[in-house]
Amino acid sequence: MPVTQIDDKAALVVIDLQVATMGMPTVPIPTSEVLKRSVALADAFRNHGRPVIWVNVAGGQPGRKANADGGGGGLPDNWTDLPEELGVQESDLTFTKYAMGAFHDERFETLLKGNGVTQIVLTGITTSLGVEGTARAAYDKGYNVVVVSDAATDMVESAHDNSLNAILPNLAEVATTDEIVGALD
């Protein structure tokens, strides 16, 4: 279902597009394409006076899990940094999370409420973890949610497909970059 509207108080929220994820082998969309489309959306949101929020992850919850290292292996010292290619502007907001979804504590919702946000438009890595986790919590908290299907990707194609086709349509509108930009105009 294409997006029905972009709220006047919508924010673009880019999940985990950071140094640690730039070289990840993602499917079905290469990370470079997610970056390119996220940057285009950020420009469009700024041009329409709507906030852009860059979310990075700097750790995880302590609970036991089968994949103890998160699949990341050895990470560089600057793994949490936002790459220059994103073109982060002074007017943009940044947020560091410590779990899969951005709503793991009250800080993210406080940031959204402080900026009057009623809708979040999500891009990022990975579709089935960071993007879906944030979308689920946003929906539960009453936000309008849009997931940008061609600006989200995963390390497992079946997980990406399940999120976009089975899970996310139950709690979000799913649209392409072009549809979002068109809805802003």
Image: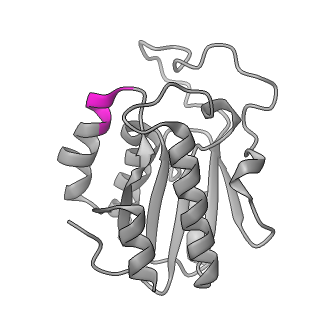
Q: Position of residue 142 (x, y in %)?
A: 35, 70
Q: Quadrant of the C terminus?
A: bottom left
Q: Is residue 47 left or right of residue 8?
A: right
Residue depicted at 39% across the width and 31% down the height:
27
Q: Quadrant of residue 145?
A: bottom left
Give the color scheme: rainbow, by chain, secondary structure or one colour. Answer: one colour
Residue depicted at 58% across the width and 31% down the height:
60
Compare residues 35 and 162 and report the one nearer the observer: 35
Does residue 61 show up?
A: yes
Compare residues 134 and 46 and report the one nearer the observer: 46
Does residue 163 lie above or below 72 as drawn? below
Q: Position of residue 58 (x, y in %)?
A: 68, 36
Residue depicted at 55% across the width and 31% down the height:
61
Q: Is residue 135 left or right of residue 14?
A: left
In magenta, the rendered stretch is 156-160
Does residue 106 show up?
A: no
Q: Is residue 53 left or right of residue 136?
A: right
Does residue 68 lie above or below 118 as drawn? above
Does residue 166 lie above or below 109 as drawn? above
Q: Quadrant of residue 77?
A: top right
Q: Position of residue 104 (x, y in %)?
A: 52, 47
Q: Is residue 179 left or right of residue 84?
A: left
Asked if the magenta segment contains residue 147, the reply would be: no
Q: Position of residue 35 (x, y in %)?
A: 58, 48
Q: How many marks?
A: 0
Does residue 105 lie above or below 172 as drawn? above
Tell me the chief SS of the magenta region.
Answer: helix
Q: Quadrant of the N terminus?
A: bottom left
